[in-house]
Image: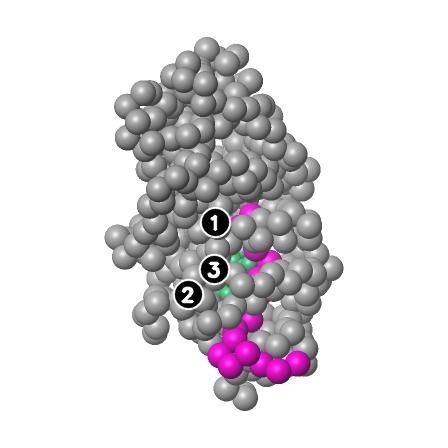
Amino acid sequence: MIHQNNSIYIDGVFDIVHSGHFNAIRQAKKLTDYLYVGVNSDEGVTKVKGSPLLDDDERIYLISGCKWANKIIGRLPYTPTIELLDSIGAFYAAHGDDIAIDENGEDCYSEFRKVNRMKVFKRTEGVSTTDLIGRLLSIGLRNAGLESEANIYKPIPSKFLSTGRRLKEFCNDKIPKKGDVIVYIDGVFDVLHPGIINFLEISKSKGDFLYVGIYDNETSRRLYGKDYPILSLQERVFNMLALKYVDDVIIGSPDEINDDMILTLNLSKVLGEESIHEDLMKIGVDPYVSAKKRGIFELVKASYKINNDFLIDRVMKRKDEFTCKYIKKHEKEEIYYKEQKVVINEI
Ligand code: CTP
């Protein structure tokens, strides 16, 4: 296949995709006009890192929401080869400045470095899949009454830096056009899972411009309990802004969409997800009273479960394996933070 001039291939496991992954894809996109995003197969990942929490289809679906990817290719080997890139039409491979090791302990990208077909960008500090699995495990263990085990996962202060520049890079800088159907949804939008992506996809299909109201940490705790949100408001904002369905966000939105808000944002529709709406009504919270009175409220149903429980159930089924991984990764991370030198800057 002919290479599209400066095309780049970035791959990853993208298990519970997070703002570090999105920042990686964003940086890779800055280096090219055409970005291929490869999602490593369950089989390939299992040989090197153990089986991921989310399966092939789920990880592909999550990454398919990313706005910087031109083409997503799933079920690819953990270690890419030059033949693979040639066959899909990509010239460069890209990876963060952390080293990815294959099943033989070798650098996965050595072939590309030798022939100058490698692009490296700055890894995003303070956010990782292992850390997120730790946060899910700590909730699961507490729910199961295993308080002392849960204490292994001490709340780690988020090291993810939400600088103004980063925020600007993630933003769309868009406003609705005249005549646009403007849609509003709101919620916690915690750890990303297929239910959230599906809800966003459905919501965007109901209009032209989608605003996503993201509850602040205090509101999330009040509605869902002291363990929530799992992600900080900043992490949730970055996740939402990385998704192609989202046009703009309200950072720390109220859980009551009042008339002022409807008029200020010129909302044409306010949507609620069926199961979330039901849960909120059970605790006596209805954010949609004004929208209902105005006849602009609509219920939609996501075809995947929309809560975190299935993620928590999954990590709990493999709790010993994940605990081992968590402890090892944290030891490595501590060393990384102590020894890190800025070699390249974020782009
Ligand atoms: N990446 C990054 N910042 C992070 C995590 C990942 O820049 N905090 C980059 C990696 O350098 C790689 C891509 O994202 O280029 C895909 O990473 P992936 O294989 O999914 O995972 P890990 O590097 O193991 O990330 P994690 O620690 O979150 O599992």
Residue 243 tag number: 1
Distance between mark 1 and mark 2 Cα atoms: 15 Å
Q: In which quarter of the image is residue 233?
A: top left
**Residue on which the image places disc 2:** 27
State the count of labels. 3
Disc 2 + disc 3, Cβ < 8 Å: no
**Residue on which the image places disc 3:** 68
Three-letter amino acid code at the position of disc 2: Gln
Q: In which quarter of the image is residue 186?
A: top left
Quarter of the picture containing the C terminus is bottom left
Q: Can residue 152 be seen in this view?
A: no
> In the image, residue 346 lies at what x, y percent?
34, 66
Q: Earlier in the sequence, mark 2 or mark 3?
A: 2
Residue 333 magenta-highlighted? no
Q: Which of 140 and 212 is in front in this view?
A: 212
Q: Horizontal placement of 347 versus 57: left or right?
A: left
Three-letter amino acid code at the position of disc 3: Trp
Q: Horizontal placement of 264 versus 81: left or right?
A: left
Q: Can residue 179 be seen in this view?
A: yes
> Which residue of the protein is positioned furthest toward the bottom in this rendering?
115
The magenta region covers 1-17
Q: Which of marks 1 and 3 is nearer the N terminus?
A: 3
Q: Earlier in the sequence, mark 1 or mark 2?
A: 2
